[in-house]
Image: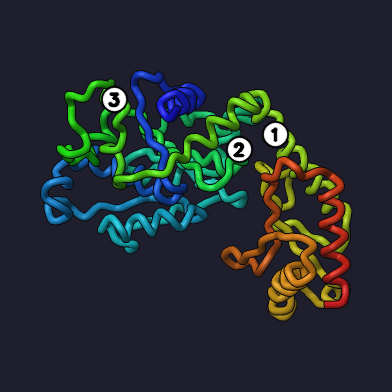
Amino acid sequence: METILLKKMYEIIGWGETEADGIFAPGGSISNLYGILVARYKQYPEIKRQGMTALPCIVLFVSEQGHYSVKKAAAILGIGTDNVIEVKCDERGRMIPAELEKNILEAKRKAAWGGGLLLSRNYSSKLSGIERANSVTWNPHKLMGVPLQCSAILIREKGLLEACNQMRAGYLFQPDKLYNVDFDTGDKTIQCGRHVDVFKLWLMWKAKGTCGFEAQIDRYMELAKYFYKVLKKKDNFKLVFDAEPEFTNVCFWYFPPRLKHIPKGCERDQELQKIAPKIKAQMIEEGTAMISYQPCGDKVNFFRMVFSNPATRRADVDYLIDEIERLGKDL
C-alpha cells in the first residue's frame, strides 16, 4: 500500500515513479527533518561516518514565516538554530525570491499543509514548479482530512533516502529473503518500528477517489472566499490582509464597539491583544466553537480560521461570526 500510494504522490507532483523515493513519517515536523537530513547527506555524505566535525559551517535558509520545525531540526541535527537564516517575505507571507537568490544553497520546498492542492485542477497552479524541488513534505492529515497522523517525505532522487539512513541490521534486513526485499523499507527510516499510517490514506483514497478529494479541497477554498466576503461587509471585523485569500486560511480581528472609538495606536493594540483570547476562552467554556488565534510580528492577536473539515458548510461560517459578535460585543 505504501509503495503504491507513494508512486501516486510522485506522479501528482510531476516526478517519474522510477526516479523518486519516499517514506511515511510520524508527522510533518519529522518529514521536514528528513528533508534536511537527506539534503545534508547529498552535499556531505561523509557526515554519516565522521559526524559534524568533518563539515564546514553549514546554514539553512527558511522563510521568515516558515514552520518552527525547521529550527527544531537544525537543533536536533547539530546545525544549530543560529545557523538558520530567515528570508524576508512580502506582505502576503511569500518568500521574496530576490532575497533568497543571494544565499540559496539547495532547493527544499515544503508543501505539508498545501500539498493537497495538487489534487485540485482549479488550484494546483498555486504550487506550480514544485516538481523542481529536491524534496517535498506532504501531510494528508491536513488538507486531505486523513486522521492524525499521516505524513510523507518525498525525495526526488531515488536511493538517496536509503543511502543516508541505512545501517543494514543483519537480524532484520536480510537480502536473501523469500519475498522481494524492496518491500523492506525500514532501513530508509530513522526509526525501527513504524505505525501503519498509510492504511488510513489508502482506505480514504479508495473510498473518495481523487475526484472526491478534489471536490473536498475546492469546497474549502470556496468557503474561505465566502468567509472573506462576509467579513469584508462587517464594520466590526478587520482582515489582517485585505485581499481574497490565497489558501484556506483567513486571518482577522474582531473589534468590540468600545475599541472602535480609540484611535489606532499602542493603546488600541494593547486592548485588541486581549480580545481574541477572551472570546476563545468563552467559546471553550460554553462548548460552542473552536478557532485559533495568534500574534505575528508587529500584529497583535488575531483569529486564524482554517477550513479543513469536510462537514463545514456556509451555515457554520455564519454561526461562527454571530458567535464571535455575541461573545465579544461587551468586552
- Name the residue located 21 percent from the left edge and 25 percent from the top edge: 177
Q: What element carries label 2?
A: loop
- Name the residue located 48 percent from the left edge and 23 percent from the top edge: 8
Tag 2 residue: 144
Do we see residue 25 in this rendering?
Answer: yes
Left or right relative to 138: residue 234: right
Q: Tell me if mark 3 has few (under 14), some (14-19) or many (20+) residues whose alpha carbon lies within 10 angstroms of its own.
A: few
What kind of residue is marked 3? Asp
Residue 28's place in the image compared with 78, above or below, is above
Q: Pinpoint residue 180: horizontal percent, then vertical percent.
A: 28, 21
Residue 259's place in the image compared with 160, above or below, is below
- Tell me the quarter of the image containing the N terminus: top left
Residue contact between numbered discs 3 and 2, judged by CB atoms under 8 Å: no
Left or right relative to 39: residue 143: right
Residue contact between numbered discs 1 and 2, judged by CB atoms under 8 Å: yes
What kind of residue is marked 2? Met
Residue 233 bears which disc, if any?
none
Q: Which of marks 3 and 2 is nearer the N terminus?
A: 2
Q: What element carries label 1?
A: helix
- Tell me the quarter of the image containing the C terminus: bottom right
- Name the residue located 60 percent from the left edge and 32 percent from the top edge: 204
Residue 19's place in the image compared with 297, above or below, is above
Q: Mark 3 or mark 2: which is in front?
A: 3
Instruction: In the displayed orientation, state which residue is furthest to the front.
Output: 178
Left or right relative to 4: residue 164: left
Residue 182 bears which disc, if any?
3
Q: Which of marks 1 and 3 is nearer the N terminus?
A: 3
Q: Distance between the residues labelled 3 and 2?
A: 28 Å
Residue 216 bears which disc, if any?
1
